Image (cartoon, rainbow, N blue to C red):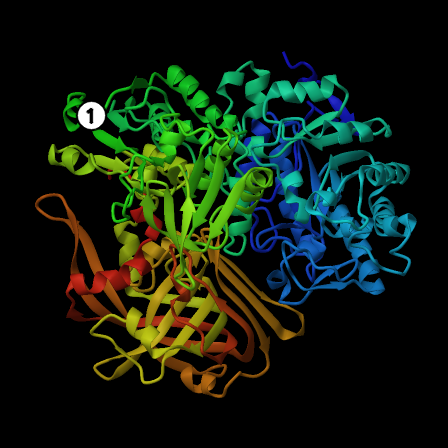
Amino acid sequence: MYDRLFEKDRIGNVDIKNRLVMTPMGTNLAELDGTAGPAMLAYFEARARGGCGLIMPEICRVNEATGAGMFRQLAATSDRHIPSLAKLAGTVHKYGSKIFIQLHHPGREGVSALIGGQPCVSASDRMCNVSKQETRPMGIDEIHELVGQFGDAALRCKKAGIDGVELHCAHGYLLQQFLSPYTNMRTDEYGGSFDNRMRLVLEIIEDIRRKCGDDYVLGCRVSVDEFLSTIGVEEDYIHIEDGIKIVKALEAAGIDFIDVSCALYETGLMAIEPISFAQGWRKPFIKAVKDVVGIPVIAVSAIREPAAAEELLDDEVVDFVGMGRPWLADPEWGRKVQEGRESELKKCISCLRCFETLMGLNAQGLPLECAVNPLTCNEKRYGELEPDTVGHRVVVVGGGPGGMMAAETLAKRGVKVTLMDRQESLGGTVNLAKRPPLKERMEWIADYYRDSFARLGVEVQLGKEASPENIAALEPDAVVLATGSRAVFPKSIPGVDGKNVYTVEEVLTGKADIAGKSVAMIGAGLTGLEVGEFLGEKGCKVAFVDMLKQAGANAYRNNVLDVMSRLGKMDVEWELGHTLKEITADGVVIENVDNKEEKKIAADAVVLSLGYSSDRSLKDAMEEKGLVVCLVGSAIKDGTIAPATKSGYEVGANLFRKPEPSFVVTGDELSNFAKVSHMRGQEGIYLAYLTDPAAVAKVLPAPLEPFAVPVVTVSACHIKEPTFADNYYEAILGVYCTYKGQVGLYPISLLLGGPGAEMATQLGRDNSAIPKKLGAEFYIRKGENDKVTCNVSRRGAELLNIEMQLGSYNHPLTHALYQSPVPGKVTAGSGYYFHFDRLPDENGKFKFTNTGLIRNVCNYTYDAWTPGYVNRLEIKSSIDDPWGCLPINTIVGGAYAENNLLITSLEYLEDVEPEALMLKVIPAWYDQTAFMKGGIK
């Protein structure tokens, strides 16, 4: 079965074990310097191990000045990237898979903030209507330089053992901007005629061939139709006839394969298809390309199932089947299909959560999320499941996405699981989500778990209302509450209890017989829009009412555009910017949010789509019976499939896990630490800025008092030779303060990274009195022209971004704040810290106790101190690290220093009441996400 999919084939001189290609898709997993770190390697290793024949990781940067496409993006701009690319190649090759790198420049579809705030570049100055970044045309010298940069990047890939490269000439990025008459309005040799518009790409191909040789595999991804007429564009653009002409010219230039795609950002629905698009919908224009070229053709076409993939091969539409999102949903897609385990596939439902988070979390540097697979981009972080060797029993209440994921994860660990749900079928709210037009694929979620539960032995009890009594009768060791949420039904609105008022659930399940009637849909979020379309197909005239002035304001743009494209052909009315005041027997009364004018809308029926609230009705009753309860999904907070699935996995993975120390300190080591705490070879950035006094007051616990001047200090250093650990990196955010008149520094947060970070946490310079968090990533570089750059991030979020020009301070006050340091000088300093214990009381409940204020005294001996002018200082917060809590009012200045730090004493100053302290110090000691994870410790 599916014999064609698993035939061997060849592209250029590269043999590929099957016809499955993972096409490029950004992840936000790369390290800040553009290298592939452990998280990215683990991500692609899972897909290679899962049977993919050819992996094209993601867009790869070739130009640092204007070519950043994402905050965390793979790069080949420097020879220092070669070892990282080699690791990536080796990881993929280990499983017999091959790897091509996609070389990319975003052009006008970039983000100005990623390139220092300067305008984006393009063929011309036409701004992208989606990214909306100021855009300027490239100069001739820039174009010539870019040609060489593409060639150099390809050569680095070859040196790293990458099997081939692909030029990204699609989706509206820079190379397509030169190819298309819509974006290329130049009048020089790179614009105007077809040959001139082809010139840049052909010169890049020529340069790559000259540097890498004719035998190195080179291909192009091409948007063969931009589909701009679908958004009303009447100007010339790339139509399929032009696309065919382009690919023929590329083949004549000697490339080895064509990767067929379509569209650009403005026509994103065609490039990033939502759930309504059929599998294989691109066949006609892919086939048009296949019929005119003699080189292998790769193409994506919203393929989700193996039968649809095989059909593309049988119909000679492609030589290789490209898929992106299916490999996110199930990294074992290839192996499962080849082994005849198609029923075990976790299929992509085309919900676009991956693109929503990729774009939405880009600025934070966080990786994308998959709604159905929480392990995607978390392979390294989550690791392997810990087997349950005790034989625990768990009852899961609720058969929605969160409950099903929790049940499966627990069962995979060996826990005995019973799942109860009052509905007659698995799926929870998915059973409603699948009912609007073109959303049948949502049923795939429940299909997967039905098969999984049968294999894992999960006992499923459907049509059964869970109660404390019948749950307790099963004698579980824990209960997972995945009871979801209930529709908001505001009793305060007059007429809400009328017989003409219905919920979304009543409409979608057919309990509300309102076909052919006029309907007032209260709520124009994505759910309201989809239900409105559902009613429109049943002949209803629908009037949408929403207090917001934009339909689907809080939903992902492409999903909203998809539904709106069909609603536009129906009999609908829009009353946006209005609130519901009253429901009458023949309609509703609404009020304009701006001028407060009231208006009557006639309607036979009123449907409320006002959101949902968490259902925790069983929690207290079960806890009263002594049952241990964990909440997942919408039972915690109403949300979508993705957070529900993620919370279900985390509860399932962490329940009953035994916490074990990852680092053990021996008595001898502790004794040695007590003798001396010396941080030798400390090198890095020190700077200060002024903030708002009120902000300092918020973060400074009593009995510490604010210093007269609201000074914040920031440091990021490499500790090369500490006496208590291997070398490590640290970053400190602190404020000047006083205690009984004595000035010192209070660190709000201290981040550690590097080889010795964990040792430093246990044996650190302060005997663990300072709050420390592991897992920070540091990039500190002293480059040419005495420019120093620094980036610090943790858990995927950038916290610190600094650029400093050495030579002078921003303000002379800097020198005084740091006690006028010069090489050879010794200065003294002190810091204040709060220490506490977290211990169980007589009832086993953990409490904070033994809380006290500590001061340490230290000496700095400087080997070097070079003043610095801070050009850029960005300090940001993440959910775990509140670094952005102190706004930057005035930058005082900074320096690049080398010194040796010696802790000379620790002094216990006084006891402190923990209740008055904890809310201020907990963020420094603990990750906020740690309190969100379910589990019994």
Is 124 on the left or on the right of 210, as rendered? left
For disc 1, the marked residue is 476
Whole-percent x, y for residue 259 in the image: 75, 35
Q: Is residue 620 above or below residue 770?
A: above
Q: In front here: 36 or 404?
A: 404
* Figure quadrant of the C terminus: top left
In the image, residue 585 lies at what x, y percent?
A: 33, 40
Q: Is residue 644 left or right of residue 624?
A: right
Q: Quadrant of residue 123?
A: bottom right
Looking at the image, residue 784 sits to the left or right of residue 489; the answer is right
Residue positioned most to the left: 842
The quarter in which the N terminus is drawn is top right
Q: What x and y, as percent, mark residue 763?
A: 32, 57
Q: Is residue 525 visible?
A: no
Q: Residue at x 43, y 52 (%)?
A: 775
Graded by Cα atoms within 10 Å as few (under 14), some (14 to 19) or many (20 or more), the crowding at tag 1 reads some
Q: Quadrant of residue 382?
A: top left
Q: Is residue 88 visible?
A: yes
Looking at the image, is 577 positioned above or below residue 218?
below
